[in-house]
Image (spheres, rainbow, N blue to C red):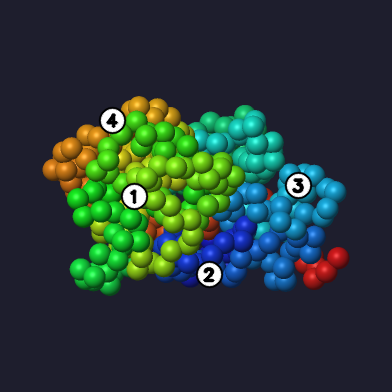
Amino acid sequence: MSFPAGARLSVARAPWTTDENPYQLAVYAALAAHGIDLVGTADLSEEWPTDPAPDVLHIQWRLDRLARRAPQGEDPATWVCDRLDQVRRTGTTLAWTVHEPGALLDPADPYRSSVERHLLTHADVALVHDEPTARLVTALARPLRTRELPVATTPLGDYRPFVESTPLDAEALDDARDRLGVGAHQRLVLAQGALRADKDLPLLVAAFDRLGRDDVVLAVAGRIADATSSATLRSLGRRNVRILPRHLPSADVAAHYAVADLAVLARRVDWTPSSLLFAVAHDTPVVAPDLPTNRAAIGDRGATWATPGDPLALAAALRRALDDPTAAAATLRAAQRHVADRSWGRSARIAARALSAAVADRRATAPDPEPATTGP
């Protein structure tokens, strides 16, 4: 059974998120052209479902935020899983985009692993951005389900249409260097974006220490989002590390990339690699851990690769890229060629078909939904 031709699907996303994020802009702007209407951002609550309920509840990243409205005294994971069950009982299709494959079912985080196991078991469709993640999700879900979880691979597209395009004059570039504390004869390595535990700031700082170059500045620019990053930043006494721990306007971000010699990402496990694509969209060569998701995003020759989790290897990769800017520029061109073959429109077509198929299957096999309620 397929979804009726010409019909549009209503999709609410959860947990709370913002349209300022380039990924959100790219994904939902492209989906609108393929019969998908974003009807808002949903908070799980005791009052679910909304009236009318959306066709699809789309679970995105930050699974911790799903429990924002859990009553005090209740186990957050149990409450979230119960809410997700209630969503499905109303007839709404449950879709999940998997953003953090390297942390799936991590026993060190009981809340997240419980919610992820529930989604692997009960989601009607999973969306992923690369084949390595598709294989992992399929393998993890198979023993938990009586029917195989449908998994659709929607490759990340080119971020160039979503980055600041205003031409930068010499004054703007000088201001960026001053803001980052980069001297006239120094090189700049940039780590950009919100600092979360997965970006492993302690590893990055350790690698920069081992690089040991007075002519190189490491700039870390972005909001601090986890305690480990905060503790690392408080301990810094290094004259060549610059910290801008706040959300930055797009024009500043563009200027930072424009004056950077390299962008660097220190990460131990597979994750959605938007940070790499964002750097490539800003014409900045990348030094990154050699992970399957990263290679899928920017190609085998798209970065100067380092062994994941190894500060010595990351320092060596930084040194190679700094000492051979011609080779680093070649990796950037290779990454841009790889990304140019990807389009958000094509990914949206794949996602729209997967969501439509999941809704049709849900309606064909699910019992009649419970009546909507507007309050407790």
- Helix, strand or loop for disc 4: helix
Q: Is residue 260 left or right of residue 150?
A: left
- Where is residue 312 shown, x and y percent of the image? 35, 27
Query: Residue at position x 33%, y 28% from top?
Result: 313
**Residue 103 position by quadrant:** top right
Disc 1 versus disc 2: distance between alpha carbons? 37 Å
Q: Nearer the viewer, mark 4 or mark 2?
A: 4
Q: Work out whether residue 85 can be spotted.
A: no
- Examine the image and state in which quarter residue 174 appears: bottom left
Tell me if mark 3 has few (under 14), some (14-19) or many (20+) residues whose alpha carbon lies within 10 angstroms of its own.
Answer: many
Q: Which mark is residue 37?
A: 2
Q: Do the numbered discs 3 and 1 sit on residues whose CB atoms are within 8 Å?
A: no
Give me the C-alpha separation between circle 3 and circle 2.
30 Å
Please give the label number shown on residue 190.
1
For the point 68% across and 61% down, the residue is 43
- Which numbered disc flags the more N-terminal residue, 3 or 4? 3
Task: Give the CA distance from mark 3 to mark 1.
Answer: 37 Å
Q: Give SS at disc 2.
A: strand
